[in-house]
Image: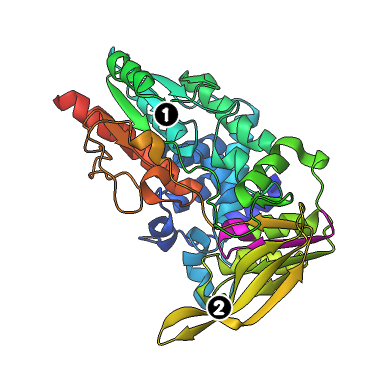
Amino acid sequence: MNDTEAYYEASRCLFCYDAPCVQACPTSIDIPLFIKQIHTDNITGASKTIFDSNWLGNACGVVCPTGVLCEGACVYNHQDVPPIQIGRLQNYATNKTIDVDKVIFKVGKSNGKKIAIIGAGPAGLACACEARTLGYDVDIYEAKDKPSGLTVYGIAPYKITNEEVLKEVNYLQSQLGFNIKYNKAINSKEELSTLENNYDAVFIGVGLGATRQLGLEGEEKEGVIGAVEFIEELRMKHHQVKVPAKVVVIGGGNTAMDAASEAARMGARKTVLAYRNSKEKMGAYHFEYELAISSGVDSLFNVTPLAIVGNTKVEGVKFAKTELVDGKLQTNMNNTFIVRCDMVIKATGQAKQGHLYRLIDGLELDSKTRIKINDEFQTSNPKYFAGGDAVNGGAEVVNAAYDGKMAAQGIHNWLQNK
């Protein structure tokens, strides 16, 4: 948005009492307030309102599914009037502030205590920012060479660029002074013991791992890749990544939509999205599916993969039709067919980081390998706190940002009362 667009869009807001957009935002940003501040040319105030609730307010203005969160709750939707473009206004205000490096945060008075954070994703960064305002020294241990986790490695490039993501992290880091140790994966009990001995509390914000194996015949063939790995390679190598003429994407979530959209946009002549259930049962947001279709993606519903065919390279995927029988999805082995392709992208979920969790003494997990926490984001091992995908099993960037912020407050409450 330019200044004029932002001014006129802000003027449309009704500044609702008990605004439904605020209730729909996982971080409860005071949306009417920051829009009013934009309208009165108080851009710094608008940015502070946003960041006070969401430390990744700039990125979230772009990557959040605003159509089903804040904008989806806008009262204008009941009048067949387009909702306020809250995400764009949020991104506009924070960009203006970040671009001039406006100082709006202050590090809290040092309390002499230190917090270690495992993972520099959205949850870890939000925890670090909040902890610094409360006076803690913070070190983040990040396995990769760039911060922001999912935001920089796992979101389709057409949504947000690496430069945009890293600009916000640099802005926060320059003002709040948390330390990020890159290429420092925590993989052993010895490394965890070192953290426990050197820090007063540890926050786990590691997110999810690699794409899960499907156990299909031929899954090891050349040309089979996980959707998360495909998008990560694309974000790191950009134009050096090429896709073949025919691509099959297996899955029905938002990551599947991202992978399919990218494959089609990158020049695949035919991209087929294959999902085991009906369109209505897909986990993806409807607007993400519509975006994939508008990019040129075809879709196959009620099909399940049986095998990946070919010699050493992928030549196709053998599918069987599925159908509901007595409310249960069953595979019809009498109705099979092959979809020819040169590449298979598996968007079938990511594995949890159970190998790390099991190294931590007394850490309770649920049946889906998610870390159990209390209302203060504290785990069953009192020195450890957790948030983001490690706890919810995979949600939005904005959910992780909320968890990280609240976990820092939980750590503060625990250490104050200890």
State the image coordinates of residue 299 (x, y, percent, origin top left): 68, 73
Q: What kind of residue is marked 1?
A: Ile
For mark 2, what is the residue?
A: 278
Which residue extends farthest front?
311
Give the vertical position of 225 relative to 303 (above or below).
above
Q: Give the image quarter of residue 137.
A: top left
Q: Residues within 10 Å of mark 2 (few under 14, many from 20)?
A: some
Q: Residues within 10 Å of mark 1 (few under 14, many from 20)?
A: many
Q: What kind of residue is marked 2?
A: Ser
Of 341 and 72, nearer the camera is 341
For mark 1, what is the residue?
A: 118
Of 96 and 66, nearer the camera is 66
Mark 1, secondary structure of its residue: strand
- Marker disc for residue 55: none
Give the vertical position of 75 relative to 170 (above or below).
below
Give the vertical position of 374 relative to 274 (above or below).
above
Q: Quadrant of the C terminus?
A: top left
Mark 2, secondary structure of its residue: loop
The segment highlighted magenta reads 244-256
| In this picture, residue 224 sits left or right of residue 69 | right
The verdict on residue 249 being magenta is: yes
State the image coordinates of residue 140 (x, y, percent, origin top left): 45, 23
Asked if labels 1 and 2 touch by Cβ distance under 8 angstroms, the answer is no
From this viewpoint, is residue 297 visible?
no
State the image coordinates of residue 265 (x, y, percent, origin top left): 79, 56
Give me the C-alpha separation between circle 2 and circle 1: 39 Å
Q: Give the image quarter of residue 380.
A: top left
The disc, 2 or 1, on the residue closer to the chain's N-terminal end is: 1
From this viewpoint, is residue 306 visible?
yes
